[in-house]
Image: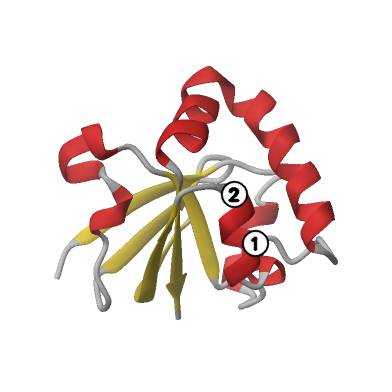
Amino acid sequence: MKIWKLKFASYKEKDDMFNMILDGKKTVETRSRNPNDGENDYSNIKVDDILEITSLDSGNKIEKVVTFNHIYNSIEELVQHEDVTKILPSVSSNDEYLKVIEEIKNKWGDKYKFELENYGVVATGFK
């Protein structure tokens, strides 16, 4: 078992993403994949590993147990196989989720965009 440290920025309001996890509304986290990240390559997450989730807004922490880890070559492939409302509970459709991802690519910069477009995405379920 490994402990993975994940830091969460807010999306629209302070602690919004962290609170969705705390409330049990968000049960899947996605991260860009980078096979060059060695020990920090999220595709190496295993069932029963621990996610130590920290809010960048408040510093609050919570631990969750991994239930699955799926690797996708693209965001488009991800939305074909995952329930996007478990990733981002504020969206109501795959199209809306894809629009949000485009916003996030711009917000989080070139490295994030490059990794998503070249290496894909990892979807990690937790309880």
Q: CA distance from mark 1 to mark 2?
A: 6 Å
Residue lying at the far top of the rendered structure: 110
Residue at mark 2 = 75
Q: Is residue 103 in sight in this rendering?
A: yes
Task: Give residue 116's position: percent from left, percent from top.
Answer: 50, 37
Residue at mark 1 = 79
Marking on residue 103: none
Q: Amino acid at mark 2?
A: Ile
Task: Give residue 27's position: percent from left, percent from top.
Answer: 55, 73
Task: Give residue 57's position: percent from left, percent from top.
Answer: 58, 41
Q: Is residue 13 in sight in this rendering?
A: no
As drawn, 55 above or below 48: above
- Of 80 and 87, nearer the camera is 80
Total label count?
Answer: 2
Characterize the local packing of mark 1: few (<14), some (14-19) or many (20 or more) Cα atoms within 10 angstroms.
some
- Of 10 and 94, nearer the camera is 94
Q: Residue at 74% of width from left, 66% of height from top?
A: 89
Cβ atoms under marks 1 and 2 closer than 8 Å: yes
Q: Residue at 46% of width from left, 22% of height from top?
A: 111
As drawn, 106 above or below 93: above
- Of 89 and 37, nearer the camera is 37
Q: Amino acid at mark 1?
A: Val
**Where, by quadrant of the figure, is residue 79 drawn?**
bottom right
**Where, by quadrant of the figure, is residue 51 drawn?**
bottom left
Characterize the local packing of mark 2: few (<14), some (14-19) or many (20 or more) Cα atoms within 10 angstroms.
some
SS class, disc 2? helix
Left/right placement of residue 5 relative to residue 104 reads left
**Where, by quadrant of the figure, is residue 43 drawn?**
bottom left
Task: Give residue 33's position: percent from left, percent from top.
Answer: 38, 43
Left/right placement of residue 80 relative to residue 36 reads right
Q: Residue at 64% of width from left, 75% of height from top?
A: 23
SS class, disc 1? helix
